[in-house]
Image (cartoon, rainbow, N blue to C red):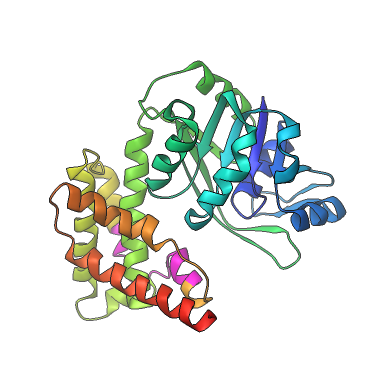
Amino acid sequence: MRILVVGAGATGGYFGARLAEVGRDVTFLVRPARAEKLAADGLRVLSPVGDLHIPAPQTVTADRLAGAGPFDLVLLSAKAYDLDPAVADVAPAVGPGTAVLPILNGLRHLDVLDRAFGAERVLGGSCGIVATLTRNGAIRQMTDLHTFTYGERDGSRSERMERIEAQMEGVRFQARASDRMLLEMWEKWVFLATLAGATTLMRAALGDIIAAPGGKAFIEALHDECQAVAAANGNAARDKVFAGARKMLTAEGSAMTASMLRDIEAGARIEADHIVGDLIERGRAKGVETPVLDRVLTHLKAYEHRRAREAA
């Protein structure tokens, strides 16, 4: 199976490197500067579960992708705000038999990919990893979390799923096929929107919010609101999953923050519309009121407008 990984950053680069580590046929679609860096230094992963160095990873740039022929599997891990150009770049790699496996947060990207490639080619996917790209271009995994879940969106057991499962055998990350992939994507979205919404609005870690007057009640109200949207769309988080998320979100002393808060603190772009805005829209379509999420989105969009104004 020929696998194309879109990008060689912290997320796609990590999972792609681990696949290449066990001999899978992996090619990274990268920008010219990244291609030169990888050709010179290789792809290096610094990880608590084992470091890895691939001296000469296979790479391709967008202008040469058409000549590389269609791939069997496209692993897409772009940020939501980079999705449209990523779709345009990857289009020459998608043939009649190609499966597209996105591991973005939320669900809006599925609509974009369905329109571009056809719903029959687009799988569901989700991942969990805390990683960053260092100044010298290495991927540093910050914790031992590295989950990778994938599945047909209708829950079926297909031949291509079996082929993908075979590719995942022996990899040094926790890979799992799911027959409830859309539900699992919703469950992660409910948790992530709560985490991102709370920590960005309050500019603080969960434990700091819990310690503040009304902090726990605020997080619980936000979590309930996100769950209400999921329920109205037929994908309420399962009781055990919801309870586990609630416990994590309201843990005293927790230093957990969302990556969106870290992006704001760095003055970077954020996925406000994809993570929060789309959840509000899906709630509104089902008649669910979202006053807390509305306030979160106002805050995030104000940040985006300020960032754009100061950059002008």
- Please tell me whether residue 15 belongs to the stretch shown in magenta: no
> Percent position (x, y) of residue 279?
28, 53
Residue 101 seen anywhere in this rendered image of the structure: yes
> Percent position (x, y) of residue 222?
23, 63
Residue located 71% across and 38% down the image: 65
| Quadrant location, the N terminus | top right
Please state the extent of the stretch shown in magenta in the rendering: 247-263
Is 116 situated above or below 14?
A: above
Residue 22 seen anywhere in this rendered image of the structure: no
State the image quarter where residue 74 is shown. Answer: top right
Residue located 51% across and 23% down the image: 161
> Percent position (x, y) of residue 15?
62, 43
Is 296 situated above or below 86?
A: below
Residue located 43% across and 35% down the image: 114
30 relative position to 180: left or right: right
> Percent position (x, y) of residue 24?
71, 31
Is 178 situated above or below 111?
A: above
Q: Which of 101 and 116 is in front in this view?
A: 116
Q: Which of 81 and 23 is in front in this view?
A: 81
